[in-house]
Amino acid sequence: MNSFVGHDEHRPSTFVRTRTLVGVAAAFLLTGCASTAPGGSSEPELTQVSRPPAEYSVPSGWEEDDQDNVTHVIDGETPEQWVEHQSGGEAIVQWSVMSPPQSEPTEEQVREAIDAGLEDMKSATPQQIGYLREAAGMGCVGDATVVDPPRTEEVGAGYALRYGYTCPSPSGPSRSIVITAYGWDGRKHSWTVSTTEGFWDEHATELEASADSFRITD
């Protein structure tokens, strides 16, 4: 499998540069509606995105930009799919998936790779994370501060590493959530939601719900 921690996962540009952290151990229909919860409180208004082999939701009204006809490169490889969803210049969701590896890993190998990445992220410095995310999401132009500690998650037919951070971006202070996952078939998924700090403060519930919705479907 390809190593996954240390990739400069996503950026709304033609080329994606790549970075590697020191000590990386891992190898290897749009439909939307608002609903009302008991007691009358409104749940986040989200639009479901189905892009096999994954699905997730984004805040309703965001514009989708299918990047499949644009050349992106991650560690010398071109993703099989790349999709972006944007809200003006203040917020972006990015998802990409790589082609299947030549040999399918075992579930144990997938879990070991993600767990190794978790340990790497726990020991990463603010400078390393800022460098890692320099060209991802809204971009980082300085050190990054982890605000949601790295953790692993079950994401349907796969296993993921997730964390959240803040950093100065070209558009000002920003906040992001990153999900890096492998499906049981060995395909690597990269999912990011990144916004200006002010946008996040106003829409935190929707953005957290969007990250929570990510699933690998097959």
Image: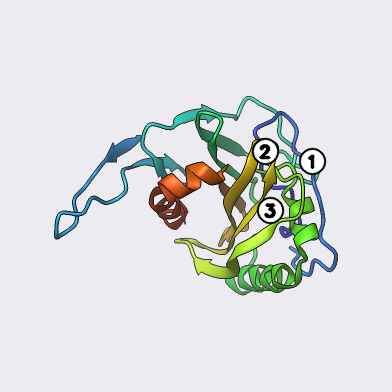
Q: Disc 2 on helix, strand or loop?
A: loop
> Label for residue 101?
3
The alpha-carbon separation of the residues under discs 3 and 1 comes to 21 Å
Q: Name the residue under label 1.
A: 17
Q: Residue at x 64, y 33 (%)?
A: 12
Q: What residue type is labelled 3?
A: Pro
Please tell me how crowded label 3 is: few (under 14), some (14-19), or many (20+) other residues with Cα within 10 Å. Answer: some
Residue beneath label 2, please?
Answer: 11
What x and y, as percent, mark residue 23?
Answer: 84, 68
Q: Which of marks 3 and 2 is in front?
A: 2
Nearer-the-camera pick, 81 or 147 = 147
Query: Would you place residue 54 above or below residue 105 in this image?
Result: above
- The numbered dot on residue 107 is none
Q: Which of marks 3 and 1 is in front?
A: 1
Count up the numbered dots: 3
Assess whether mark 2 and mark 1 are in contact (beta carbons under 8 angstroms).
Answer: yes
Q: In which quarter of the image is residue 14?
A: top right
Mark 3, secondary structure of its residue:
loop
Residue 136, position as x, y percentages in the image: 68, 44
